[in-house]
Image (spheres, rainbow, N blue to C red):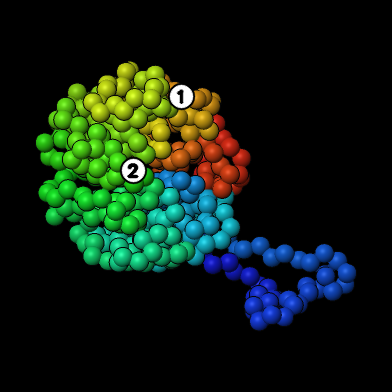
């Protein structure tokens, strides 16, 4: 999602000569015996408007700007920034070829955007074009056979689109993705190699591999869930908002991602998350979960080894706790080891691991307290 580096003419000529096998010309200072001049890439201009959505990939973060352009920052080795791959970026750069975006979704090595035309474009590395072939460091490209999209999600190795006709997933091979259920659904969520969908009755169906593969996968269809209003899934756990605005989760609980004391059991029956009421939406990271409440606050629990819950501290596991430093949350995302929130005043704050610059604050320093994205 970083634009191609813009260099002065002498640097461009240096690259061309090197590619042909010759030695690059020296800069003027080097010719006089001084240190060679290293040209820096030209940064994109500031966004023309405020952010309206944010999403987190494993080591990358992206946001939609008012008006529909997309900007991303962080890891770019697989082309996650939409420029064909390059150095990590600690400040946001424009994703070329994406306009009028209404939603974004980030996986581990690729990202996708839903346009106003209800079609999808993806960039990065993986089977991102839904045409059966893997792509490597691809720039923004159309996703084949996916139209009329109402919802777009991604995580880990897959992306999924929900339409009025059903659900389509891509990004990995068919054996990894499994077969999405047929029918009409109100919401879809993606985990690392599985997906889950919520229907109009508030019941959940999941698909993928292992414990998520129907009909015998233990996590595939939790029978006790009815009347749920929202759904989220991490790598090996999933949660729903119940009819009474509380939260239930099922799956693995090795990091306390179900909201209770960690254990090694396979929780096939959903368990109630203690101390969380008034929930409206959920977001899930690899082994962590957050509930967004009606009052604009958030409660988070699970893995917090890198401070990814935004609580101002690190911990091996965390019971549901309030994210006190970010009031009036409008949207939120969690990834492998970092998280971000979009506030109602349209600023983005991020926290947690930052080795690739995924917090977007201009540094690569870990932040336990939420840091404002340089916008």
Q: CA distance from mark 2 to mark 1?
A: 20 Å
> Which picture quadrant has residue 319?
top left
Q: Position of residue 359 (x, y in %)?
A: 52, 43
Residue topped by disc 2: 191
Identity of the residue drawn at 22% across and 51% down: 179
Identity of the residue drawn at 66% across and 75% down: 15
Identity of the residue drawn at 43% across and 41% down: 335
> Which picture quadrant has residue 126?
bottom left
Local SS, label 1: strand
Local SS, label 2: loop
Q: In the visual, does 47 lie left or right of 228?
A: right
- For the question of whether residue 199 can be seen, the reply is yes
Q: In the visual, does 219 lie left or right of 184?
A: right
Residue topped by disc 1: 317
Which mark identifies residue 56?
none
Q: Position of residue 331 (x, y in %)?
A: 36, 39
Q: Is residue 61 above or below residue 13?
A: above
Q: Position of residue 192 (x, y in %)?
A: 36, 45
Identity of the residue drawn at 56% across and 61% down: 86
Of 297 and 175, nearer the camera is 175
Q: Is residue 57 above or below residue 287?
A: below
Q: In the visual, does 23 lie left or right of 175?
A: right
Mark 2 neighbour class, 10 Å CA radius: few under 14, some 14 to 19, many 20 or more: many
Q: Pick whichever of labels 2 and 1 is earlier in the sequence.
A: 2
Q: Position of residue 254 (x, y in %)?
A: 41, 27
């Amino acid at each position: 999602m970083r634009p191609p580096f813009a260099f002065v003419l002498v640097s461009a000529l240096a690259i061309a000569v090197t590619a042909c096998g010759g030695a690059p010309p020296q800069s003027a200072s080097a010719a006089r015996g001084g240190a060679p001049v290293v040209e820096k890439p030209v940064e994109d201009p500031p966004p023309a408007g405020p952010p309206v959505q944010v999403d987190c990939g494993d080591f990358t973060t992206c946001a939609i700007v008012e008006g529909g352009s997309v900007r991303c920052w962080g890891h770019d080795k697989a082309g996650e920034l939409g420029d064909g791959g390059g150095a990590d970026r600690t400040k946001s750069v424009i994703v070329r070829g994406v306009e009028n975006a209404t939603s974004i979704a980030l996986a581990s090595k690729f990202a996708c955007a839903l346009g106003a035309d209800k079609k999808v474009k993806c960039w990065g590395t993986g089977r991102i074009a839904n045409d059966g072939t893997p792509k490597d460091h691809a720039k923004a490209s159309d996703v084949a056979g996916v139209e009329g999209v109402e919802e777009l999600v991604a995580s880990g190795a897959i992306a999924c689109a929900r339409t009025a006709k059903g659900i389509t997933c891509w990004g990995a091979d068919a054996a990894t993705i499994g077969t999405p259920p047929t029918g009409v659904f109100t919401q879809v969520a993606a985990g690392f190699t599985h997906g889950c969908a919520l229907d109009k009755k508030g019941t959940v169906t999941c698909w993928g591999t292992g414990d998520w593969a129907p009909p015998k996968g233990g996590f595939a269809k939790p029978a006790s869930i009815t009347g749920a209003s929202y759904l989220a899934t991490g790598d090996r756990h999933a949660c729903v908002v119940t009819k009474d605005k509380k939260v239930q989760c099922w799956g693995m609980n090795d990091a306390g991602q179900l909201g209770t004391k960690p254990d090694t059991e396979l929780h096939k029956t959903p368990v109630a998350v203690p101390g969380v009421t008034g929930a409206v939406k959920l977001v899930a990271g690899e082994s962590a979960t957050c509930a967004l409440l009606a009052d604009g606050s958030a409660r988070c629990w699970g893995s917090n080894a890198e401070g990814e819950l935004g609580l101002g501290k690190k911990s091996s596991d965390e019971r549901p706790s309030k994210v006190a430093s970010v009031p009036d949350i409008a949207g939120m995302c969690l990834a492998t080891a970092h998280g971000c929130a979009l506030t109602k005043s349209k600023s983005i704050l991020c926290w947690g691991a930052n080795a690739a610059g995924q917090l977007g604050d201009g540094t690569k320093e870990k932040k336990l307290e939420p840091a404002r994205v340089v916008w």
